[in-house]
Image (cartoon, grey):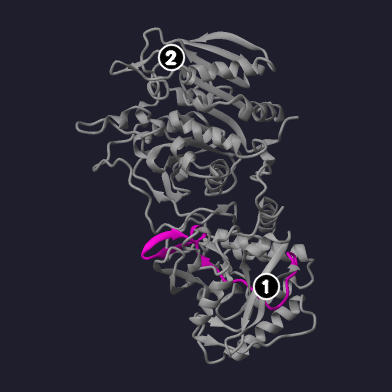
Amino acid sequence: MDTDKSKRTYLYSSVPHLWLLFFCLYLLALSTGCQTSTPHYEASPNFSERTLTLQQFDTRIQIILPAADQWKSDRPTRLIIYALPNGNSIEWTVGCVRTPGLDWHYDIQHIGAQTRRLREVNNRENIVIAYLEADKKSWPAWRASHPKANEDIRELIEFVTTQIPGMVDGVTLSGHSGGGSLVSGFIEGGDSIPAIIDRIVYLDANYSYDDDKHAGKLLKWLDDSKLNRFIILCYDDRNIELNGKKVVSDTGGTFRATHRFLDRFSRDMKFDAGILSDFETQVARNGQVRALIHPNPQNKILHTTMVGEMSGFLYSMCVETPEEKKWGELQGEKTWTKWVQPAPATPQVGAAAPATQPATLIKGDTTLYIKGRVPFNSLAIPPRAPDATDGGAFMNSIAALSREQRETAIGKEFLCGNVPDFLRHFKAIKVKTMCVDGIERTIEYQVSPDYLAIGSDADFIRVPMNPYTAQAIADAFGCSLITKKMVDDIDANATVRLEPKPLTEAREAVTTFIQHNQIIEEQRKGKPLGEIICGIKKDVVLTNRLLEKPSRVAIYGWRKLDNSPIQPLTIVHIDWYVDYSHGIRLVQREVKVDGKVMMIEDVMKDPHLHVLVNDEGALKLTRYPDHE
């Protein structure tokens, strides 16, 4: 059955994370008009394009939009993901005019010029391209160094998708050379290929094709919609040599990988052989599947020549579209040369994105889930809209909702940035501890001075919520939840200490949440906002005890003036249980151990360092399990 592309969702249902919650937040945001800013794109001197450069998952990302006057709101938007070849920077991949002394890599792919030519002939879609440059400039090496690489690739692509203004209607997933490893990892990263992906392109990049890992998912994806396209571009690389030595092993290379693919897929479809320029073609299912193989009779290295010089990128973007005959032809005259940008005044191989750039995820009009890096002492909390609802009004608006509806509304409000200013300025905590290996170390981390609240400084309410909503907010803000030991250390650094005021009636009612907040604010009179406060809430915490029973929430704390906590660490409550006394305090994910930046989850689970943040042993669970 065909998929209606205009109604596609970003929901990657094959990844079990928190997609159901986020999709509900997204729909609610659309219906309520969530106000937040979109990512800030910089004006480019090249063809009036607009660019956004980000760093996530050890990946440098550059997204390029067309000029503002070329962006048409009534057109669907296509996002092209281009995973870079090994050893190449984004700047080399985009390309520019070759000038004396300029590195030759600037003049081989020209994906920037080919994309501009695509925009010139395609008046149906807004064309956006995102270049993905892996750490150390190798996607195979990136995957090898990430324990959950394939799942992370799925989240990385989702992250990129959410940075595009408005709605993305179709995604082309492509890679050249080692960039094909990202494409393969994406296929392997879930039970199925999401509907938003409607074109998959291996540009001499299918080294990692595997019948067992890929064939079933690709076949199902092709069956899901006749509009989906799968394209392979390769050449006979079996005997190519560099400096007198064979480049490809006796079993490797894209030629052999393509024939493994053809042998397997021939069991499910009929391929028709043909010729296109110097390429041999194999086409099946009325053009849905297409492999182009250059026989390479002169035994040349055509690896990138096919992509740039022969316009293989443009061909693969246009084949089986209305632009197929408009842009030019494979291996023909280059129709994109007028779109090559000038050489930079100071050529750079590709500097990293600014370390201080926080990554805020925007999807349509709302902010969603992130598990990427946010720099030390920097947060990814969206700005609060001028017309955002005050805390009291918001809480009154959710008082009659069901538990599930309430959680969705709370999550959406936080992810829209409806957070008071005093909660945006985290405080430093320094703790010195003898570690398991006998070495005394110091950890510094940044914590929210108070518990999560909705509203403005003048009108806010501290908001209890279930651990899954809290985890989604923490992820989106570049933060983590805290441990029992961290509660103790934070409380020890508190400069505002209040006496706990327990309530006994209607503990789970929103009206009681409001009442308890009013009690706290009466106690706090005369004491400044934004100081570290304790004695007002129990903390929702991380603990290995969550592994003892499924679907539980762990709570601890609510410290008395004599420094003793009312609530010992407990997992007695089911995960959906929320009462007025529960509070969420966040810590930034990046911490410093003896001055070295680390991710807090790595410290939590380290066999030697965990004692800096946890007194129960190394944590096996550094976030609340993903909740369906």
Between residue 267 and residue 89, name the one nearer to us.
267
Secondary structure beneath dot 2 equals loop
Residue at figure coordinates x 72%, y 52% from the top left: 628
Residue 281's spot in the image, x, y percent? 54, 12
- Please identify the quadrant where the N terminus is shown: top right
- Please say if 206 is above or below 37: above
Q: Quadrant of residue 622?
A: bottom right
Observer able to see residue 462: no
Residue at figure coordinates x 67%, y 38% from the top left: 191
Check disc 2 and report the residue beneath it. Answer: 238
Residue 594's spot in the image, x, y percent? 37, 66
Tell whether 79 sits left or right of 271: left
Residue 107's spot in the image, x, y percent? 31, 29
Between residue 232 and residue 574, name the one nearer to us.
574
Mark 2 residue type: Arg
- Please say if 622 is above or below 235: below
What span is in magenta? Answer: 574-603
Marks 1 and 2: in contact by CB < 8 Å?
Answer: no
- Please say if 237 is above or below 516: above
Tell whether 136 sits left or right of 181: left
- Please say if 445 is above or below 527: above
Check disc 1 and report the residue beneath it. Answer: 464
Q: Which is more N-terminal, label 1 or label 2?
A: 2
**How packed is label 1: few (under 14 Cα within 10 Å), some, or many (20 or more)?**
many
Secondary structure beneath dot 1 equals loop
Mark 1 residue type: Pro
